[in-house]
Image (cartoon, grey):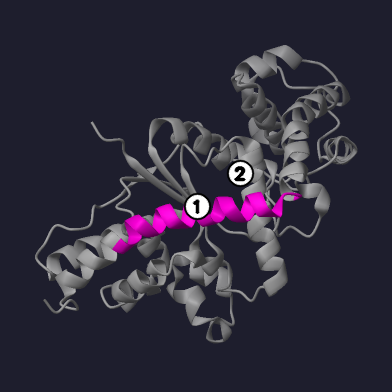
Amino acid sequence: MSKDIVFSGVQPTGEIHLGNYLGAIKQFLNFQNECDSIFCIVDQHAITIFQDPNELKENVLSVLAIFLASGLDPKKCIIFNQASVREHSVLSWYLSCTARVGWLNRMTQFKDKAGKNRDNASLGLYAYPVLMAADILLYHADKVPVGDDQKQHLELTRDIAHKFNADYRHEYFKLPDPIINKDAPRIMSLRDANNKMSKSDVSKYSRILLTDSNDEISTKISKAKSDSLKMPSSSDELSDRPEINNLITIYSSISNIDKDSVINLFSGKEISFFKSELKDLVISLVEPIASSTNEIKSDISYLKTTLEDGAMRATERARKTIDEVNKLIGFSID
């Protein structure tokens, strides 16, 4: 029996943080062993907002280095950058002629990102869900891991695939299913537990990067917002203590110990003691990744070769899709 095809894309904007690792990369490590996995560094998505060209190239290599340092194996999965496979852009145009403006008008993320000055937003920012659909459908993905902020875009992908199939009277594209890992933690900012840990947060103390030094991790954990009470004795107390809830979630996710057990382990203890234990735990995860990332990043030739090999393997699949779609649309003259 063939394995399910899993596709996921990661934008090369800013550095990868602990929330990215626990919410996504940790899943990727399982996917590469269980599924036919394709991981794309989506540099074309990144330019919906202007990127400095040199920084963009550097960020692509940085994301790749962290992927490899975290344990993704190019022999077990396909890893490449989106711009190196031109078929993504080709299929995106085809699907732009299938998608409907009304569908895109309903995308709430564009409204959030564009803000009040929507007329000044790029067309790419408005239409990028169609490129996302092309990314997924190009490889006939069965499943796509998504967070809450991307579920609507996957529904759009399914709508586009369904309409394309209906228009050309051929059940060609699969309707991909979301992978919503209910066990995947939602890691919040260390400075404001009402917001997700984010690359774009102004405060560097809001997030732990996978390239942080041990001293930086210690400082960030020590400065993490908490309260003056002792550690909770039951999960019932967490609803009124979002910062402590977040720190316990991080401890639980790294240690693979359920939250109730973590609460029992530290019940009634001082928060400073818990933070000290959490600091050691985070360092035990991040230190080898950071060390390996720095080593891998110094080998530019290896990084480029890895991307080139991944792009070659991705292109082989992508060209087959475009050839078949060309025939369905009527572009191929036999």
What percent of the width, then of the height, locates residue 46? 58, 67
Residue under label 1, please give it.
309
Task: Tell me if I can see residue 210 in this picture.
Answer: no
The kind of residue on which mark 2 rests is: Phe
Q: Is residue 195 above or below residue 57?
A: above
Taking 228 as reference, is 54 left or right? left
Residue stretch rendered in magenta on the structure: 298-319
Magenta stretch: includes residue 300: yes
The answer to whether 247 appears left or right of 317 in the picture is right
Q: CA distance from mark 1 to mark 2?
A: 15 Å
Question: Can I make out residue 204 in this image?
Answer: yes
Report the quarter where the C terminus lies. Answer: bottom left
Q: Which residue is mark 2?
A: 67
Amino acid of disc 1: Asp
The residue tagged with tag 2: helix, strand or loop? Answer: helix
Q: Earlier in the sequence, mark 1 or mark 2?
A: 2
Q: Residue at x 63, y 33 (%)?
A: 239
Q: Is residue 45 left or right of residue 218?
A: left
Local secondary structure at mark 1? helix
